[in-house]
Amino acid sequence: MLVSAAACTADSSGGGSGSASCAYRVTYRDRTYQDVANVDFTVGGKLGPATQPPCDDTGSQGGDEEAATTETAYEVDGLSPTVAIAVGDTPDEARILVAYSGGELPPEVAELIGK
C-alpha cells in the first residue's frame, strides 16, 4: 500500500488559547521519531506499539495533564526501523515518522522525497 504523508500538528482551529500545538512525535524502542512531509512510502509489516507522549504546550502550567497514547508502528518498505516507521491505528491511516533531530533528513528518506 502506497501512502503519501504530510506534516501535521494538532488542530488549533478550536479557537481557544488552550489548543494544542505540539508536533507529532512518537517513541518506539527507545528512539524518538517525528513527522515529515511529502514522502511517498509503502507500509510494511506490523512492528508493535509506538507511544505518543502527552503534549505539554503550556509548559506544565495547567492542571490537566494529557495521558500518553499508543498506536501501532509498521515497517516502511525499503527503510530500516532505525531510520523510519509508519504509525497509525491501521496501515491505511499510518503516516511516516523519521528518527532524526532537526537539521537534515537521513539520506534514505531524502531519496524517497526526491523520487
Image (cartoon, rainbow, N blue to C red):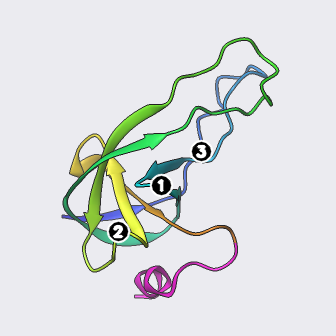
For disc 3, the marked residue is: 9
Which circle marks residue 66 in the picture?
A: none
- The picture places residue 105, in percent across and down from the top left corner, at 57, 78
| Residue at point 74%, 19% (across, down) | 16
Nearer to us of marks 1 and 3 is 1
Is 88 on the left-hand or right-hand side of 7? left
Q: Quadrant of residue 70?
A: top left
The secondary structure that dominates the magenta segment is helix
- Label 1 to label 3: alpha-carbon separation: 22 Å
Mark toward the start of the polypeptide (2 vs 1): 1
Is 70 on the left-hand or right-hand side of 17? left
For disc 1, the marked residue is: 30
Looking at the rendered image, the quarter that the C terminus falls into is bottom left
- The number of callouts visible is 3
- Label 3 to label 2: alpha-carbon separation: 23 Å
Label 1's element? loop
Q: Are marks 2 and 1 in contact (CB under 8 Å)?
A: no
Q: Amino acid at mark 1?
A: Asp
Which circle marks residue 81 in the picture?
A: 2
Q: Quick check: is 19 in the magenta stretch?
A: no
